[in-house]
Image (cartoon, grey):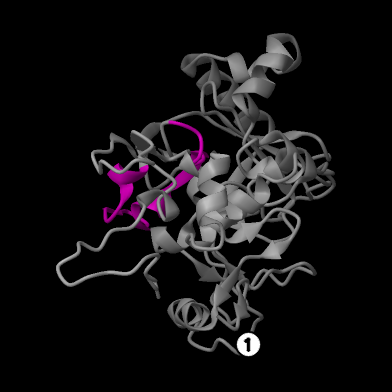
Amino acid sequence: VVVMTATRDLSPGDELTFDYATSEDVEQNWKCLCGVATCRGRVTADDWKNPAFQAKYRGHCMPHVEALIANSESDAALGLFAFADLRGSGDVGGAFWSPEDVAKAGPGNLPEAFWSAEKCREEAANVAAAVPLAVKTPPPGPDAWGRHLVYLPEQDGEEDVCLPILAGQTVMLMPPNLLLRDRQMRGRRGYMGTLYNAALQVRPMGQRPGALFSLSESPEDLDNYVNHSCDPNCDVEVFPTNYLIKLTANRDIFPGEPVTIDYEMTEEDMVAQGDQFECECGGENCRGRILGWKYRVAGKGPIKMPAKAARETRAKIAPNPGVLQPLVEVSSA
């Protein structure tokens, strides 16, 4: 629920207004004509970074904007929008390389960030040939995962020994396919439900000009079947220079084992996408509900939400909200 509180006395006939930057942090950049003495001139997705804005509105913004302001207080927490810190720590939202870090690394240390689209496809084919993956459909049952991607090397005979994918090895490269901005994705359906289900986020909302998604090219593309786990066996990197997505094994992966990633390493706002879900990965660090990394404060756990808003969020996500602990904490506000 959104509660608007008067910041000054209102007389009959006064127009009700609010500062859009207290709720919107993406895809806005327009000239303001409000005419007040403190007018900023333009309203942008970066207004929350302005110290004067923070001093005026802190404590009166939407939760995700409050989180951005909180994260900006220290270099370590700034990782949600200065991506290197989170990427290095393996925290949620940590898949994204920053343009600045790519430039510092250079093609000698980070060659894949400088590949052309054609080179991305060529290298993806080479990895696919070296690391055989296949879609597996398990028999029906209460513990069935549904169709999922597994490491499935071929065996010529019973005595053949299949080696695991070693930790640190590239498991999969996903070249940039059809790239769409968030406003082009909203409300559209695809072959896997919402269009977001057939895409991975390759640019965060806070990186101009806004969120960007890479869609798979067909229903049979293997990347459609990479399942989520809160204890994944693959780390994800996304390069801002060519939007290549790289999956790297963070431990040995054995034949027949599912290939998994943490969806909150890339997906920012799965509530807005309509794709939030209750996780049943069974991992030791299972977070219960997967909402997108926007709803988690770096290094501080869940964002606190007012009690009514938290109840409404839980009701949308889980038919039995008592089974798992929510990601959002209830405050008394």
Instruction: Note whether 141 is above or below 248 in the view shown.
Output: below
Whether residue 193 is in magenta: the answer is yes
Which quarter of the rendering shows the N terminus?
Answer: bottom left
Where, by quadrant of the figure, is residue 238 drawn?
Answer: top right
In the picture as drawn, the residue positioned furthest to the left comes out as 13
Task: Give the x, y percent position of residue 100.
Answer: 64, 21
Q: Position of residue 247 (x, y in %)?
A: 66, 38
Relative to 205, 250 lies left or right: right
Q: Is residue 268 visible?
A: no
**Left or right: where does residue 30 sit relative to residue 328?**
left
- How dense is the environment of label 1, judged by Cα within 10 Å: few (below 14), some, or many (20 and up)? few
Residue 171 lies, with reference to residue 149, above or below; the image says above
Q: Is residue 26 left or right of residue 87?
A: left
Q: Nearer the viewer, residue 154 or 19?
A: 19
Q: Is residue 309 magenta?
A: no
Q: Position of residue 332 (x, y in %)?
A: 59, 83
The front one of 283 and 77 is 77
Secondary structure category for the residue under label 1: loop
Instruction: Establish if 12 lies above or below 248.
Output: below
Residue at the image position 58 percent from the left and 50 percent from the top: 68
Which quarter of the figure is the C terminus placed in? bottom right
State the image coordinates of residue 122 (x, y, percent, origin top left).
54, 19
The answer to which of 201 and 5 lies nearer the viewer is: 5
Q: Give the residue drawn at x 41%, y 43%.
A: 26
Residue tagged by mark 1? 323
Residue at 48 percent across and 83 percent down: it is 308
Q: Say whether residue 307 is visible.
A: yes
Which quadrant of the structure image shows residue 160? top right
Which region shows up in magenta? 182-208
**Total numbered labels placed on residues in the image:** 1
For image coordinates 63% across by 60% down, the residue present is 296
